[in-house]
Image (cartoon, rainbow, N blue to C red):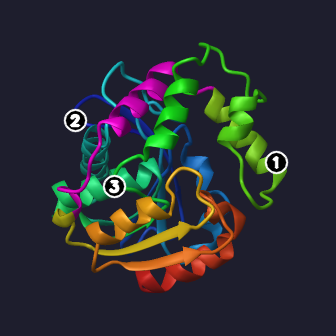
Amino acid sequence: KSVTTADGLTMTYVEAGPADGMPVILLHGYTDNSRRWSLLAPLLTGHRLIMLDLRGHGGTAAPVCCYGPDSMAHDVAGFMDAMGIAQADIIGHSMGSITGAVLAAYYPERVNRLVLISTAINVPAGPSDWLWTNVSALPDTIDPNSQFMLDWYYNPNPVPADFIDRERAESAATPKAAWMGVLQGLTAMDLSKVAPMVKAKTLILWGDQDGLFDAAAQEAVKAAYPKADYVAYPGFGHNMFWEVPEQVAAKIMPFLGN
């Protein structure tokens, strides 16, 4: 489905589950889209799930500017207005978790409960350097089976091949403006002053084999969200909700109240 915000941004989304109850808006990661929730969503039973394509991703429009988490949070608030949603639970992964945290900080009345999967306060230097080296060199047409894309979708544990192959192909089709815009926005990001503004009850999930946001990054996360419930998944990676969706759903469901 699609809806256009008051700012004129046409955003696409997938909706599932019963229409009543507190909506749950799911925000995907960098160069992913609403389909990235396909393995987890069926396990979040009894909830009205709204899986959104953020700007420049999936079917949502890809403006030339701007792709920082503040702009994306503004988009999500505008999406909620267009949908008539006063308040929602938010589940975000990676870039989507950062967007969700900024949304909860800047629009506290709009967020009931907040789930941050594989999150960070800022992007560590090593991953940032790797991203700048590779993303800035990407061609306009990206081969989904290139070494960079295979590395980008690496997981330390098995993920269904049909799912990951589709995700990689859709990610490769992401416009270059979005690839670079998100990278620029994340590089300039420092949520150390924003995170304390989050008032919503928060659950943070992290896999200790995360190649982007390592253990040191998590110490900063814990310091920024001292009241959050924090769960680590030993042996699992940045996309642990693809690797063990049942275990992740088992933590999220009671947190959301089911």
Tag 3's secondary structure?
loop
Q: Which amino acid, mark 2?
A: Ala
Query: Residue at left 30%, top 28%?
Result: 66
Is 238 placed left or right of 122 in the picture? Answer: right
Instruction: Tell whether position 170 is magenta.
Output: no
Q: Are marks 2 and 3 in contact (CB under 8 Å)?
A: no
| Location of residue 189 by image quarter | top left
Q: Nearer the viewer, residue 133 or 87?
A: 133
Q: List the residue tagged with mark 1.
A: 162
* Image depth: mark 2 or mark 1 in front: 1
Q: In the image, is residue 242 above or below residue 151?
A: below
Query: In the rendered image of this protein, does residue 132 appear above or below residue 25?
Result: above
The residue at which mark 2 appears reads as: 6
* Mark 3 Cα-neighbour bin, 10 Å: few <14, some 14–19, many ≥20: many
C-alpha gap between disc 2 and disc 3: 30 Å
Mark 2 and mark 1 lie on one chain; the one further toward the N terminus is 2
How many numbered circles does the render carry?
Answer: 3
What is the spatial separation of the Cα atoms under label 3 and label 1, in whole angstroms?
32 Å
Between discs 2 and 3, the one toward the N terminus: 2
> What is the secondary structure assignment of the residue under circle 2?
loop
Q: Is residue 190 magenta?
A: yes
Q: Earlier in the sequence, mark 3 or mark 1?
A: 3
Q: Amino acid at mark 3?
A: Ile
Residue appearing at x 63%, y 62% in the figure: 209
Q: Which range of residues does the magenta coloring cover?
A: 173-195
Q: Residue furthest right?
A: 161
Residue 32, horizontal then vertical, whole percent: 56, 42
- Mark in the foreground, 2 or 3: 3
Residue, disc 3: 121
